[in-house]
Image (spheres, coloured by chain):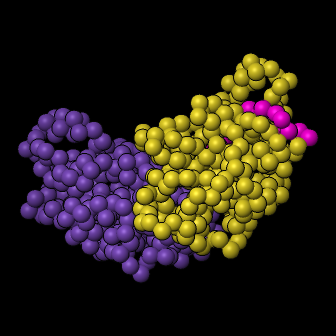
Chain colours: A purple, B yellow
């Protein structure tokens, strides 16, 4: 089997992933926030790229029945209910709710992945659960959401962690592309200090300057959750599933 | 000053590089072949993406006065004079000639870089010369040609070598983006065995299977040349320049 990593959403386009599982990583902060929202009791999350489309959808579904969530360039969006900090997503705000979620990079990556058998949302918080939810190892695509279409360190390290723990528990031969080998190497170099790595990364540094250091601390919690967000089969919204160890 | 690396041509698009030097890396094999062609006495090289356009240009310039050069997926192109192996480019074939050069990735990367102050073509053979030809350190963009729009290991390691030697000889502060930090890590891991690294890379492995192991050996020669190919100011063709140490 192969594990192929793609450092930006553009790199996965044009590939036929119908038979494959895709895991989308947007550690800072889309994936981490989606996991946090489900932990807090959100029932479904609809990823939307375009802001106007998000607002139109909110009114179509009933503005009072949904929460408009997301960010642009690390900042909350005017008129939206929630930003993109996992710490905002508490049960009193999101329990039982449908969330419309538009982040600069994460929503784009999820929607670029449409052509797949399964689409899972991964971050450091749920990496073991993600691995355990993949029943039959076929080719696995790891898609880094990146930042504005450019390589981001923290997503590559998280993909590398997936590869590392997968290879430790799978006995067969695994083929890696160049980006997978690189991610694995980056993870091995940084696994002792995930928070330090997040602080070093361009986007981590940017968020720290915005006063969001606590988001980095939250994102750095390895395997704190067992929730596996998955895009539903009709590919319209993300639901929470729970990992079942099969490997 | 900053050194910003981009792992694919798509990532540089939309950036204003007018004040910046861009170095394009396509180690296997575009950049390496361009350096070899100038070493063998070629006078200018016209990068062209589209094959039909290359052929039309050859007839416009006079078919007998130019050499049609390039490859698709590692193989020579039917009707073309030369492939993309640096070993083919000997003085008896290319001395005094204009070359029209169309490779799957290199030409695309060079032409994606148009919006820059200077555009240089780098590989392991001329990395020191490239560094010495950059007179006034401003922001430097390092553009990896990649393979079919996807991350390629050997280009990242070569960019990392540039960063490593630049940082050793430059006393000021240098800002790196995530891709630059990653490239530097990769170079440090592999600097003792560049040929081994090329063999490990996806494209190096592919070329070895095509029987092109000698091309890898040639590409792995660090600082064997002092030629710096540079896109001329009117941005239509590449000419050879020679490095002058200024740092």
* Residue ranking furthest to the top: B60
- Residue at image x 12%, y 64%? A91
Instruction: Judge whether residue B188 can be spotted in this image.
Output: yes
Tell how many labels. Answer: 0
Q: Position of residue A190 (x, y in %)?
A: 44, 76
- Residue A202 x, y percent position in the rendering: 36, 61
Please tell me whether residue A228 is drawn above or below residue B4 in the rendered image.
below
Q: Residue furthest bottom?
A: A192
- Residue, x 45% and y 52% (percent of image)? B139
Name the quadrant containing residue B217: bottom right
Q: Is residue A200 left or right of residue B189?
A: left
Can residue A21 be seen here? The reply is: no
A159, B197: nearer the viewer: B197
Quadrant (top left, top right, bottom left, bottom right) of the C terminus of chain B: bottom right
Q: Please name the residue shown 78% across and 32% down the image.
A: B98
Q: Position of residue B56 (x, y in %)?
A: 72, 20
Is A33 included in the stretch rendered in magenta?
A: no
- The answer to which quarter of the image holds residue A62 is top left
Q: Nearer the viewer, residue B6 or A103?
A: B6
What residue is drawn where x is 51% and y is 41%?
B117
**Viewport quadrant of the N terminus of chain B:** bottom left
Does residue A142 appear to the left or right of B203 in the view shown?
left
Q: Nearer the viewer, residue B55 or B235?
A: B235
Residue B26, x across and y down, in percent? 65, 50
Q: Is residue A152 above or below residue A246?
A: above
- Magenta residues span B92-106
Q: Is residue A34 left or right of residue A65?
A: right
């Amino acid at each position: 089997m192969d594990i192929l990593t793609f450092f930006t959403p553009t790199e996965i386009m044009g590939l036929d992933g119908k038979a494959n599982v895709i895991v989308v990583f947007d550690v800072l902060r889309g994936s981490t926030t989606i996991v946090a929202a489900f932990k807090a009791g959100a029932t479904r999350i609809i990823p939307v790229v375009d802001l106007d489309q998000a607002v139109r959808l909110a009114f179509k579904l009933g503005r009072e029945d949904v929460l408009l969530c997301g960010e642009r360039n690390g900042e909350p969006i005017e008129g939206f209910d929630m930003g993109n900090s996992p710490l905002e997503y508490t049960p009193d705000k999101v329990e039982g709710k449908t969330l419309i979620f538009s982040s600069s990079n994460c929503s784009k990556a999820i929607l670029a992945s449409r052509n797949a058998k399964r689409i899972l949302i991964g971050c450091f918080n749920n990496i073991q659960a993600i691995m355990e939810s993949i029943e039959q190892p076929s080719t696995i695509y790891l898609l880094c959401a990146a930042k504005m279409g450019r390589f981001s360190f923290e997503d590559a390290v998280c993909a590398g962690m997936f590869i590392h723990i997968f290879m430790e528990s799978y006995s067969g031969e695994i083929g890696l592309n160049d980006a997978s080998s690189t991610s694995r190497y980056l993870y091995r170099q940084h696994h002792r200090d995930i928070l330090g790595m997040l602080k070093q990364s361009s986007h981590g540094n940017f968020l720290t300057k915005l006063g969001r250091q606590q988001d980095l601390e939250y994102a750095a919690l390895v395997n704190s959750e067992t929730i596996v967000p998955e895009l539903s089969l009709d590919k319209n919204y993300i639901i929470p599933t729970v990992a079942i160890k099969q490997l």
